[in-house]
Image: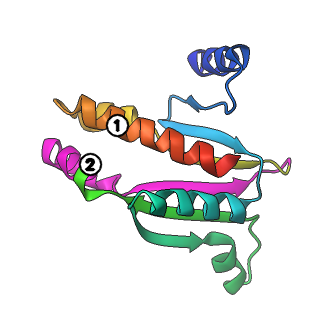
Amino acid sequence: MKFARFLIAACMIAGLSSVAAAAEDGLIRKQSANGVYQTIDKLKAALESKGLTIFADIDHSAGAKRAELALRPTRLLIFGNPKLGTPLMQAAATTAIDLPQKAVAYRDDDGKVWLVYNDPMYLKQRHAIEGRDEVLKKIAGALDNFTDAAIK
């Protein structure tokens, strides 16, 4: 956790537009300037503009409402690119549990909106993926760009 705080502080000092930190749990969290629905809509548009496949768009709060339960706005997007994901699964079949990629936008108790997704480098560690560093770096860079577009 100390590293995550250090990374956030370093990003703030460097003046980066979005602060993202990969916590020990393997999640990257970015605060959005938009609402939950707009954040996911913008992410979806950015992904589709680059030819990625949207597999599902799940509105958890709508599901909760149908079950007569309350849930703050929470929306999950499942998406991917088989050309990048397949090599990871070839290296470690268990990677399929984390693919396709997912991103969730939600509003917290303080009214802040967060966009959260798996850090690809954490997947490397979790699944002992060897020999796919270039693919992982490419995925990490693309996710950073897509999510930055969604939170602005």
Residue labelled with disc 2? 84
Which amino acid type corresponds to the residue marked 2 in the rendered image? Leu
Please tell me which residue is depicted at 37% across the width and 41% down the height of the picture. Answer: 139
**Label 1: few (<14), some (14–19) or many (≥20) C-alpha neighbours in 10 Å:** few
Which sits earlier in the primary sequence, circle 1 or circle 2? 2
Q: Secondary structure at mark 2?
A: helix
Please tell me which residue is depicted at 76% across the width and 54% down the height of the picture. Answer: 34
Question: Compared to 89, does 134 lie above or below?
Answer: above
Residue labelled with disc 1? 138
Please tell me which residue is depicted at 77% across the width and 72% down the height of the picture. Answer: 70
Q: Secondary structure at mark 1?
A: helix
Q: Considering depth in this image, is 69 or 152 the residue closer to the camera?
A: 152
Residue 105 highlighted magenta (yes or no): yes
| Numbered range of the magenta stretch | 85-110
Mark 1 and mark 2: span between their CA atoms? Answer: 8 Å
Instruction: List x then y, in percent, for residue 102.
Output: 46, 56
